[in-house]
Image (cartoon, helix red, strand yellow):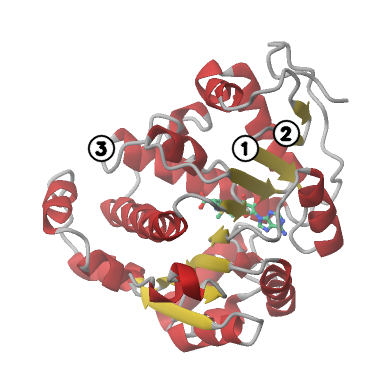
Amino acid sequence: MATNLRTPSFASSSSTSTDTDDEGVRGTCEDASMCKRFAVSIGYWHDPYIQHFVRLSKERKAPEINRGYFARVHGVDQLIKAFLRKTECQCQILNLGAGMDTTFWRLKDEDLLPSKYFEVDFPMIVTRKLHSIKVKPFLSQPIIELHADDTLQIDGHFLDSKRYAIVGADLRDLPELEEKLKKCNINPQLPTLLITECVLVYMTPEQSANLLKWAANSFETAMFINYEQVNMDDRFGQIMIENLRRRQCDLAGVETCKSLESQKERLLSNGWETASAVDMMEVYSKLPQAEVSRIESLEFLDEMELLEQLMQHYCLCWATKGGNELGLKEIVY
Ligand SMILES: C[S@@+](CC[C@H](N)C(=O)[O-])C[C@H]1O[C@@H](n2cnc3c(N)ncnc32)[C@H](O)[C@@H]1O
């Protein structure tokens, strides 16, 4: 039932999903947000919001993991801001598999919000995120502030407001996804940035291809940012796969993570006009020198080789469609 976000009481609502097969995949949300929170807690980057979504890990994360997360968040942020600059914020952002991502709140603080920001994740994850939003004014106030009307559409796994919407849906069920986004007034004519940060790899190649095709066909002018594994055919990649499998998490889409070429090829063969990809070592090497000095002074890392290996197994890819007049194709990392 729809309730008003201004009403502080929270009636817990159970998710409609009874599927336990995706438990391992949903668990990656906790992993990613705990790693981000840990890195933030020791000063890698500023994010006052993440602590409201996830507890602080009792275990210290390794320095190479923290640096990896820094490069990931920095890299994705850079591309998001490039899109926002090109469109002068007259656009929408659709974060698919957003987990506990805090980009909406961080962009608001920088006065860089798009016309509307949408998030999608499994209903169970969305229920958790919404609970945090409802009980913490620090999270709900920015949404309320931007919402002119009195009533906000909100229930256990759905919230729709003027500038922010979050919906619980399975990204492999495209008719359901589309229907829910339409309910939140997604606009196919507005330049749209879609983001999948460590998400596609949990779907089969066919399912991620369908999602990419759907995205390319749904929006006239669009950009897609994808962050995930690459170079997974080697020994290091195989160990990553085995470690995750032991935690009941299958990388069903790992086949597409063979190389930067296979990543670009997937985008180009599913309706996208341009595609680019860089591994995270390249992203790291292009960080401003002052930032590198700052983060490298936070913790001692004795095995630079380990960092390099890790960074060579993740990549940032982006694709565009239309938007010549905006200069979307000129976006480079
Ligand atoms: C590794 S986490 C990343 C979360 C977030 N993008 C980040 O980087 O912090 C992967 C997220 O994708 C979501 N996800 C994976 N497959 C999905 C699907 N088929 N439908 C909806 N969400 C999915 C998971 O629930 C999880 O929140």
Question: Crowding near pointer 1: few (<14 within 10 Å), some, many (20+)?
Answer: many
**Mark 3 to mark 1 CA distance (whole Å):** 28 Å
Q: Which residue is mark 1?
A: 164
Of the numbered discs 2 and 1, the one sitting upstream in the chain is 2
Observer-nearest of 139 and 40? 139
Q: Which residue is mark 2?
A: 159
Please name the amino acid that badge 1 sits on. Tyr
For disc 3, the neighbor class at 10 Å (few under 14, some 14 to 19, many from 20) is: few
Q: Circle 2 — which element?
A: strand
Q: Residue at the location (21% across, 68% down)?
A: 285
Amino acid type at mark 2: Leu
In this figure, which residue is indicated by the disc labeled 3? 43
Q: Give the residue at x 58% y 23%.
A: 140
Q: Secondary structure at mark 3?
A: loop
Say if 287 sits above or below 257 in the image: above
Q: Image quadrant of residue 244?
A: bottom right
**Of marks 3 and 1, which one's residue comes earlier in the chain?**
3
Viewer-nearest residue: 179 or 23: 179
- Amino acid type assigned to the residue bearing label 3 in the image: Gly
The residues tagged by marks 2 and 1 sit, at their Cα atoms, a distance apart of 8 Å
Q: Is residue 26 visible?
A: yes
Frontmost residue, 72 versus 216: 216
Q: Earlier in the sequence, mark 2 or mark 3?
A: 3
Mark 2 to mark 3 CA distance (whole Å): 32 Å
Q: Position of residue 88 (x, y in %)?
A: 44, 52
